[in-house]
Amino acid sequence: MKTFFDVYKHLRRKNRKQYLLLSGCLFFSVLLISSYVSMMRSQTVLTILPEGGDSRKQVMMIFVLTVIGCMVFSLYAASLFFRQKSQETGILLALGADRRILIRLMVREMCVLSTASCILGIVLSIPLTKGIWILFRLLVVDTEEMALLLDPQAFLFSCAFSLAALFLLLSASARSIRRVHIIDIISESHKSEPIHAVPQKYGFIGIALIFLGIFMGYNIPSYIIEKLNWYLPEGISSIFYLPAFAGLYMVLLHAVVNGWHKKNAYKDLVATSQMKFQGRQTVKNLLVMTVLIAGAFFASFYTPTIGIGSTMEFNARSTDYVYRFRRDQDIPMGTEVQKLAGEYGVEITDWTDIPAIRLGVDGEDQIKKESAVGIMLSYEYKEVASSDLFLPASAYTAFTGEELPLPHGSIAAVSNPEGIPRLSVGVTLLTNTLTGRTLPVDSVLSLENDALSDCYVLNDEDFISMNEGLTDEWREMLCLFNVEDCGGSYDFAKALLYDIIDRSGEEVALFNGWDPVRRQIDIERTGEYFLDSEHLEEYGFSRIRYEERDSTVFRLYWAYMPKFRVLDRMDFVKTLAVFLMLFVFISLVCFAAVFVIAFTRTMTIALTGKGLYEDLRRLGASNAYLYRTVRSQAKRVFVTPAVIGTGIIYLFYVMMLYFNDGRISVQEWAGLSCCGLLTALVFCVYYGIYRITLQKACRVLNIK
């Protein structure tokens, strides 16, 4: 060896494991981020998740958590690397190497190592993403819209993440070499990061802060909107969650320093003391793991919550087939539907058609004004604020068998028994928007029927008088019928759906929620209506296209989408395929990161304490005692974030479902129970990773 470079190469070969650890962590982080961002930015997913929608916000929130977790994970691996690297640096300085030479060697080494790891992660993320997507299509559902279209621009973010990681690595390497004293550098690998005494009350205070932060973060923004008429600026509302993060940190500190078992305080003395000496870094890792576990379960719970609830809703429907249409459309009814049913061997057991009219209703018009402190709301009463459908009382009684003595000037609002009430019970004035005829309303009754939900019921005489002068654009027809064998009528249901779509004109290719009265108000105020077809894409929504009749967008958002029990039940997975795939992928990414971090942190704690275990063995410690000590440390790394992260997100889901409508329905309880079973299944896998890690740590420490 003639040069410092030769010595450097020799030392590097002797320390291959640390290089493999750092490159592996960088590769894994970039692989996860690249896969996630390529999935999230693919045209397939963006078409389904509208800009500004809740689903996209959830995906972005979990993505940010994943980025933070992967960055912290990479920095953690770098800190371990430079601790071991400090010995090499000290040797070279002792041999007379100039710091500038070492910095140059280190920079070149870090550039090569990180560039190779990041490029490999980005390249392999493409087959990983496509492989998971193809596997999902093979095992679960395969539709035309499930073709994955990757956006090359998505990998710009992966490159930015890689450059940020490289910058931090170079900064850390430069700092490690610029130290003044050689002895400090050589002893760096033996330094600990102890945490001083933490009061026992930290655990209970932390738990209280977690509950408080979750409650405040979820409820205060809506309370401010309701009481102060103020939309907080984007992102500001998240400050109300800060007590939860402070509480989480306190709970993790308590778990690492004190543990939760007072009776075993002396039994676990060695394990607890060793955890304290590595406390700061351990708490940071547990914090990242807790956040990632919470994000993973947040994504995982989406599928059972939606799936179980929807399945129960389909089965609980009182009517097999329900569809409605505008009277200016040539849509099949009684005789034609009977004929089509006969072609498919389906017997219709009963048929009901109910006329409906669309009338203007009064209410408070919400006016938004942007300001430096957010969006301020004001309300202005309008005699015609929006529109709704109205049915005659006799038709409602004939269909449901429920006597409904509605006097003149009274109406009834029909809601789904298991849904969130949508109609206002504060309506006081109805208006025929074409003739200007008005009808004051003095009372609004509440009714429940899933087939006729989201409609009002009018006294027959009032219905006839308000119907006069309306054109067919303001009249609708509801068709409801049952069949003898609903489960065997799938082909008929699909044929009827396609027939309805084929005979619907472009004038009713409307996005769900489109309101002619609301449209007129918005056009008078701003010159445009955001739910008009020409403006949908500007606001992040997808247009309704009849040629994409089997797509998620069409099935979920077409204003006149029929409700056919057999079709909805059997095509449920197809309809929500992209949603399901996206959230499954997110959960897999987060869980994979958790498994790797838990394994790495446990092995680091074991390797750091290897000398201590040798000393304990010389002092007569039994193999059983040493095993119990290692197990105690591994359990804290694995169990603490798992219990806390799962508990937090389960509590959040329960609270979210409850505050949606002030109750938790039977379907929602069933979904939560399914989430519990899913959690148990994940914990079985998690336990397997824990056992493998524990065995590996024992093997390294020569513990049988």
Image (spheres, rainbow, N blue to C red):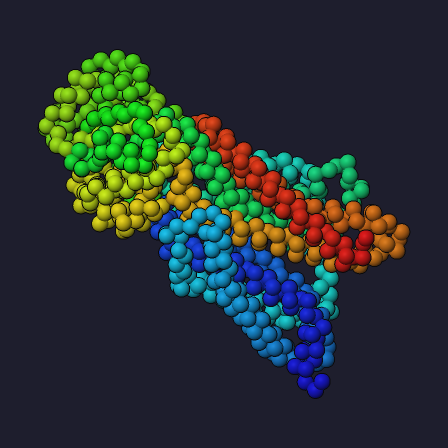
- Between 527 and 486, the one lying in front of the other is 486
Q: Position of residue 625 (x, y in %)?
A: 82, 47
Residue at image position (22%, 30%) is 335
- Between 305 and 169, the one lying in front of the other is 305
Residue at image position (26%, 31%) is 338
Residue 695 visible: yes
In the image, farthest residue toward the bottom: 2
22 on left or right of 194 = left
Q: Position of residue 572 (x, y in %)?
A: 41, 40
- Between 415 and 1, the one lying in front of the other is 415
Q: How many marks?
A: 0
Residue 411 visible: no
Residue at image position (28%, 42%) is 498
Q: Position of residue 515 (x, y in %)?
A: 23, 37
State which quadrant residue 561 falls in.
Answer: top left
User: Is the residue 158 above or below the residue 237 in the image?
Assistant: below
State which quadrant residue 427 falls in.
Answer: top left
User: Is the residue 594 above or below the residue 664 in the image?
Assistant: below
257 on left or right of 583 = right
Q: Which quadrant does the N terminus fall into?
A: bottom right
Residue at image position (60%, 64%) is 24
- Between 278 and 463, the one lying in front of the other is 463
Q: Position of residue 614 (x, y in %)?
A: 83, 57
User: Is the residue 74 above or below the residue 502 in the image?
Assistant: below
315 on left or right of 325 = right
